[in-house]
Image: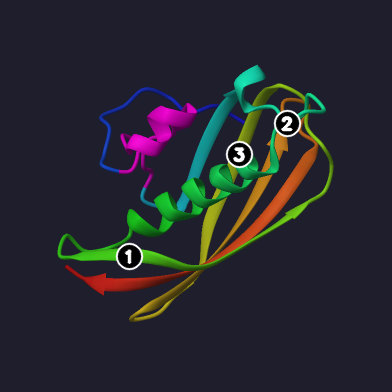
Amino acid sequence: MSSPADSTPDRFSEAPISRLIGFEVAPEKGDGKTLVALEAGEKHANPMGRVHGGVISALADAAMGTAYGRVLLDEEDFSTIELKVNFMRPVKIGRILATARIVQRGLRIGFLDCEIHDARGKLVATGTSTCMTIAS
């Protein structure tokens, strides 16, 4: 897996939540997929010293939301209407990569999936999301 590279940012790569948590959003490739990385540190840990499940969920949500948002027309916005995350293994502090893709996009509803891997390439979590397109 590669890491996000430098490029001209869009509104998804510069989201306030991304700056707050520390997400690095890869440049758009126009293929309906997105890579979002996090260098997880102590501030992302739960009491057991592992990355908090809420941080992993936010990473999945950010990756899937970015993938969906980048295929919308300029006059469209969206809202996540369902998010599910399955945790496969605890993850230690370090680099985590979320790869999301659009499975299906209809006129108003889209479905996405996501895989999150640790620095060793081990599957940490999977996620799915349903998004609703909104005319702005």
Does dot 1 land on a helix, a strand or a loop?
Answer: strand
Residue identified by numbered label 1: 78
The count of marks equals 3
**Residue tagged 2:** 46
> Is residue 24 highlighted in magenta?
yes
Q: Is residue 31 above or below residue 98?
A: below
User: Can residue 121 be seen by looking at this rendering?
Assistant: yes
Pointer 3 residue? 55
Q: Amino acid at mark 1?
A: Phe
* Residue name at image x 64 percent, y 42 percent: 56
Q: Nearer the viewer, residue 115 or 17?
A: 17
State the residue at coordinates (61%, 48%): 57
Mark 3 or 2 closer to N-term?
2
Q: Outermost residue, front direction?
A: 47
Rendered position, 71 above or below 33:
below
Q: Earlier in the sequence, mark 1 or mark 2?
A: 2
Screen quadrant of the N terminus: top right
Decide if residue 75 is on the left or right side of residue 27.
Answer: left
* Residue shown at 78% from the left, 32% from the top: 91
Circles 3 and 1, Cβ within 8 Å, touching? The answer is no
- Residue 136 screen position, x and y as percent: 16, 67
Q: Secondary structure at mark 3?
A: helix
- Quick one: label 1, few (<14), some, or many (20+) residues within 10 Å? some
Amino acid carrying mark 3 in the image: Val
Residue 70 on the magenta segment: no
Magenta part of the chain: 12-29
